[in-house]
Amino acid sequence: MKFKLYNDIKMFYQDTYDILMRNEAQNLIPLGNVIMGNAGNDKTDWRDPANWFMATVSDDSGIRLTAIMTPPHNLTLYATDNQNDDEAIICLIDGMMLQIGYIDSTPGVSSKTDYYVPGVMTEKSLAEDFTRLYTARKGVDYTIHKEMRIHQLLKVNPDIPTVGTIRLVQEKDMSFLPYWHAGFHLDCFDTPPALEKEADACHYLIGTKSLYVLEVDGIPVSISKMRREMQSVCGIGLVYTPPYFRGKGYATSCVAMVSQVILERGFTKSVLYTDLANPISNSIYKKIGYEPIADALEIKFA
């Protein structure tokens, strides 16, 4: 097995794009990052590939394991054709521990140390295999932070009841958008609100022209976002309805309408992640037309 570390996103893109495309929907996160980094149009915040960890593990048959981490986010992995191999994982771990990397995930601060890995998020069996080998090698503890399911949609259920209309968020929505964005992160990631930082994040979202708000009788009630546009797949994320408006079918309407926009733009599939601990959201997406394609785990390391 051979470990290869990349400092050039274009070379990493060239070597891994076709492999990741073999499971385009499953690889929504790593593939979306590779495409975005290669395009080089957005280097705000964590999106600058100069700060990324990118690596592959190969044998005589070609690349067996692809790894990408965009600090401060988790490591994401793909075993080619979902064929897990302990030898490839061990090679990756050993390779990471020999490289100059980050301390406390702070870009630009480095020493002779291994890469700081806050966690791993990937297909369930691969996440389990990596965690088993990584924690044994590093002597660290771990917790399963979230059990997820990856879904894809080919056609929106025409019988799903919808209400209201969607539109792209605008500057006028800054009266509520920072609070909703903070609420989403609190609900989904247990991240305490940092409202002093929310304005910049929301201005960025407005500029991407990818975040939609559902209005009912002219009142904003729910949001969802197109994310990671790829060759034939586009994802949906940042689905949030404030507590006051919940239980009225607004999230269902918003996601269904944004999913239809994705298909009308020429994508063949819409993809989203769900938290298996939230049976309500899983039932909502099933009604819209989403079908499960794989399970995934987000695991945090001590």
Image (cartoon, grey):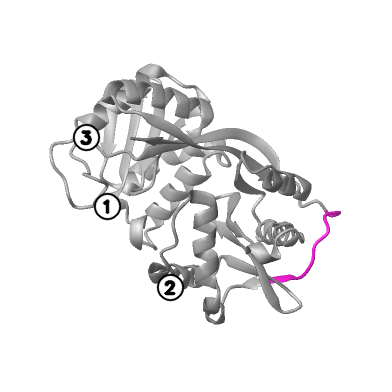
Residue 62 visible within the image: no
Task: State the CA–CA distance, disc 2 to disc 1.
Answer: 26 Å
Marker disc for residue 114: 3
Count neighbours of disc 3 (C-alpha within 10 A) and say few if under 14, some if 14 to 19, many if 20 or more: some
Secondary structure type for disc 1: helix
Q: Which residue is mark 1?
A: 50
Q: Quadrant for the C terminus, please.
A: top left
> Which residue in the rendered view is the most extreme toward the left?
112
Label 2's element?
Answer: helix
Give the residue type that dot 3 points to.
Asp
Query: Of discs 2 and 1, which sits in the foreground?
Result: 2
Up-down relation of residue 5 to residue 195 (above or below): above
Count of numbered badges drawn on the protein = 3
Span highlighted in magenta in the image: 158-166
Camera-near label (1 vs 3) is 3
Q: Position of residue 122 (x, y in %)?
A: 48, 35
Separation of marks 1 and 3 at Cα, in angstroms? 17 Å
Provide the residue designation for mark 2. Answer: 199
Kind of residue sitting beneath label 2: Ala
Magenta-drawn stretch, dominant element (helix, strand or loop) = loop
